Image (spheres, coloured by chain):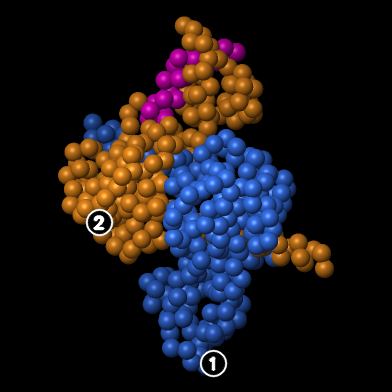
Chain colours: A blue, B orange
């Protein structure tokens, strides 16, 4: 099953291929070649050939890929046929930003609810429902939620993480600076935005220092 | 200057070391050893030794580091003595979330303003000033802004990027899905949150498939 583990950069280009192919006139039994796609999207031939090789093995020399089959393969890899449900815990600014973000659906993930520890959440945002944590477990089980996103500000992150695993969630996206302990079989991705910015700032200062030293 | 290019994971632990050292009673000429720090923070000896070796060369065998010197080195590497100014363009949910985020200051970066293309922005958020884009150039020059964060929703990302470079910004943190063209010497970090979630979802489905196949 390892071949399904598509690199992040490749995955990032798949929606673009899909969008382009779906924009073409739909003709039965039509073929499309990697170089043609590359030209249309301003990418390199080799890159497109490699990317498409990850999603489909049906390309034929000289002819290329059957357009409709390639569209289906892309959709399959982008999971647009079968949405994965996610929930956000934490209805602060970041949590609300993520819940309202429209970019996730193109990769087959939908954030279907937000939760907050406050039992009564007054929220008149049109796009989101904020539920109290007391409903977390039953909601996740009823809706087959597989991904949990943590955006709370406090140190109770581990407790939220445990509650998620308890409710059947198997992948956690952690936006807090607190590292999580998860049992084997649970995926955990830490997204430390402060650290990302710090790293950028650090690189910047190194460049500035180099320039200063170069000029003296 | 390459030794200053601290790895992101190491950088992520520096605030923790600093916080711990600052919590100790301040005694003149006191020394602290890597194993003592490791024990206090629940980390491995080797890791702490390696991390501290990146920020200071003054550790002495058996004695360890002079506490006050180590604190200064950590502060220097975390740039807490000299803040780097950043601005956010886009006052939507994500932009506001980033502008309100408190975690950046511990790494010496401060988001000092937000901008939006709307000339008049009505915003009663206590923590943030939203300025019109017409003031972008002069504001960035007057305040020596070095980092620009783009969180707008549209395809005008490249135009905003050009405006940032024009205003003297040398590092760009791009939260849009649109790739940017930047001249040499400009740092650019793309933060595609949709793609991060997609990658997590993809790994999850591979695991599920493996389990299904394993059970049949």
Does residue A192 appear anywhere in the picture?
A: yes
Q: Quadrant of residue A23?
A: bottom left
> In the image, residue A59 lies at what x, y percent?
57, 81
Q: Quadrant of the N terminus of chain B?
A: top left
Residue B101 pos. (x, y %): 42, 40
Chain designation of label 1: A
| Other-residue count near label 1 (Cα within 10 Å), few / some / many at <14 / 14–19 / ≥20 | few
For the residues labelled 2 and 1, say whether their Cβ atoms are less than 8 Å apart: no
Residue shown at 60% from the left, 52% from the top: A148
Q: Image point 41% across, 29% down: which residue?
A: B77
Q: Which residue is mark 1?
A: A29
Residue A207 visible from this viewpoint: no
Q: Please give the name of the residue rendered at 39% of the width and 73% of the height, measured from the top-left corner.
A: A41
Q: CA distance from mark 2 to mark 1?
A: 47 Å
The secondary structure type at the circle numbered 2 is loop
Closer to the camera, A39 or B210? B210
Q: Residue at x 61, y 47 (%)?
A: A133
Q: Chain of mark 2?
A: B
Q: Residue B45 versus residue A114: which sits nearer the camera?
A: A114
Q: Nearer the viewer, residue B138 or B68?
A: B138
> Residue A92 has which mark?
none
- Residue identifier under label 2: B117
In the image, residue B179 sits, relative to residue A57, either above or below, namely: above
Residue B38 appears left or right of B26: right
Q: Residues within 10 Å of mark 2 (few under 14, many from 20)?
A: some
- Mark 1: which secondary structure? loop
Q: Please state the horizontal and vertical placement of residue A33, each as a whole percent of the image.
A: 48, 82
User: Is residue B76 located in the magenta-colored stretch of the structure?
Assistant: yes
Task: Give the magenta range.
Answer: B62-80
Residue A49 colored in magenta in the image = no
């Amino acid at each position: 099953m390892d071949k399904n583990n598509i690199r992040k950069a490749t995955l990032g280009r798949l929606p673009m291929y899909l969008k382009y192919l779906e924009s073409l006139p739909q003709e039965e039994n039509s073929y499309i070649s990697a170089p043609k796609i590359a030209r249309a999207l301003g990418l390199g031939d080799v890159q497109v050939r490699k990317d498409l090789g990850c999603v489909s093995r049906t390309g034929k020399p000289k002819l290329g890929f059957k357009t409709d089959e390639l569209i289906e393969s892309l959709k399959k890899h982008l999971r647009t046929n079968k949405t994965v449900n996610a929930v956000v815990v934490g209805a602060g600014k970041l949590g609300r930003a993520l819940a309202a973000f429209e970019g996730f659906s193109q990769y087959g993930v939908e954030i279907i609810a937000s939760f907050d520890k406050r039992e009564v959440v007054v929220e008149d945002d049109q796009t989101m429902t904020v539920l109290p944590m007391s409903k977390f477990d039953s909601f996740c089980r009823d809706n087959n939620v597989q991904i949990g996103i943590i955006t709370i500000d406090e140190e109770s992150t581990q407790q939220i993480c445990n509650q998620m695993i308890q409710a059947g969630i198997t992948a956690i996206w952690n936006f807090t600076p607190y590292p999580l302990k998860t049992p084997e079989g649970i995926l955990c991705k830490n997204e430390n935005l402060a650290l990302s910015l710090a790293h950028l700032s650090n690189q910047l200062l190194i460049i500035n220092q180099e320039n200063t030293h170069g000029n003296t």
